[in-house]
Image: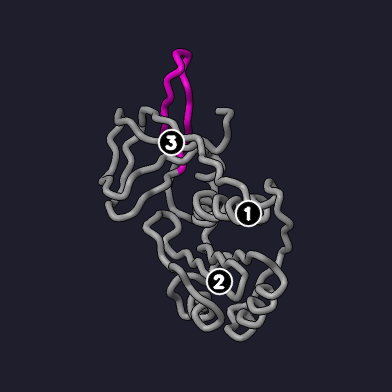
Amino acid sequence: YLLNGLLADTCHTVVDGGVIADDKKQLENTLRQAAADYDVIITTGGASVGDADYIKEILEQCGEITFWKIAVKPGKPLAFGKIGNCHFFGLPGNPLAVMVTYQQLVAPALQRLSGAPAAKPLRLTATCTSTLKKSPGRQEFQCGILTQDDGGKFFAASAGPQGSHRLSTVHKANCYIILPIDCKGVEAGAQVVVEPFSLFI
């Protein structure tokens, strides 16, 4: 439902393929048929390293895989490749990871594939009012709450626990607080880059 909602705001024709069981042969047959019928396939789940995560293996057998993991949190297990002439995006299964990888990677790619230039997201500098924990090694998109005072200055606070399954945190947030790969955390009072979900804060 989340992915359908994100795609609903685009000009693309969307066909919901439903839920497919963790059965390798069934998944392979479904992807082969979809690749013959459509320009782009987007899946959620099955791109990690669990026993029933077949996406990478099937993509290697049926087509080509360009990359499988990215240095982004949430969203490390993300597969991209082609099955024939069909472009394939295999997103993670957790809701926040789906949201981040779709907005940051898939949506711009779909715009380019449609012949349009990829729109650049609005990013602002804000004063962080929370202490943010982070380990270096991945660019991190933390859910935040962005406000603006009467003088026009922006402030960003954490929206809550940052687990990729935390829908309550996503519900409260109105922006991403973007922390670079080498960042080791942020103290309150530091300047951070934020990306609002909407132009209206």
Residue extending farthest bottom: 25
Q: Amino acid at mark 1?
A: Leu
Q: How far, Cα to Cα, is label 1 from label 3?
A: 22 Å
Q: Is residue 150 above or below residue 71?
A: above
Q: Which residue is mark 2?
A: 82
Residue type highlighted by circle 3: Val
Residue in the image at 68% along x and 73% along y: 34
Task: Decide which of tag 3 and tag 2 comes sooner along the chain.
Answer: 2
Q: Earlier in the sequence, mark 2 or mark 1?
A: 1
Give the side of residue 183 with respect to residue 198, left or right.
Answer: left
Label 3 neighbourhood size at 10 Å, few (<14), some (14-19), many (20+)? many
Q: Which secondary structure, mark 2?
A: strand
* Residue at the spot 43% in from the left edge and 36% down from the top edge: 194
Judge whether 158 appears above or below 150 on screen: below
Q: Which residues are magenta?
A: 143-158
Badge 1 is on which residue? Answer: 2
Residue 139 image offset from top left, x and y in percent: 36, 50
Task: Kindly identify which residue carries mark 3.
Answer: 194
- Mark 3 element type: strand
- The numbered mark, 1 or 3, whose residue comes first in the sequence reads 1
In this rendering, which labeled residue sits more in front, label 2 or label 1?
A: 2
Give the answer, above or below, for where 48 lies relative to 153.
below
Position of the C terminus by quadrant:
top right
Say which amino acid is labelled 2.
Answer: Lys
- Helix or strand or loop: what does disc 1 sit on? helix
Relative horizontal placement of residue 137, taking residue 40 as reference (left or right) = left
Task: For marks 3 and 2, give the one nearer the viewer.
Answer: 2
* Tags 3 and 2 touching, CB below 8 Å: no
State the residue in front, 39 or 129.
39
Q: Main secondary structure of the magenta part?
A: strand
Q: Residue 104: x, y in percent?
A: 50, 50
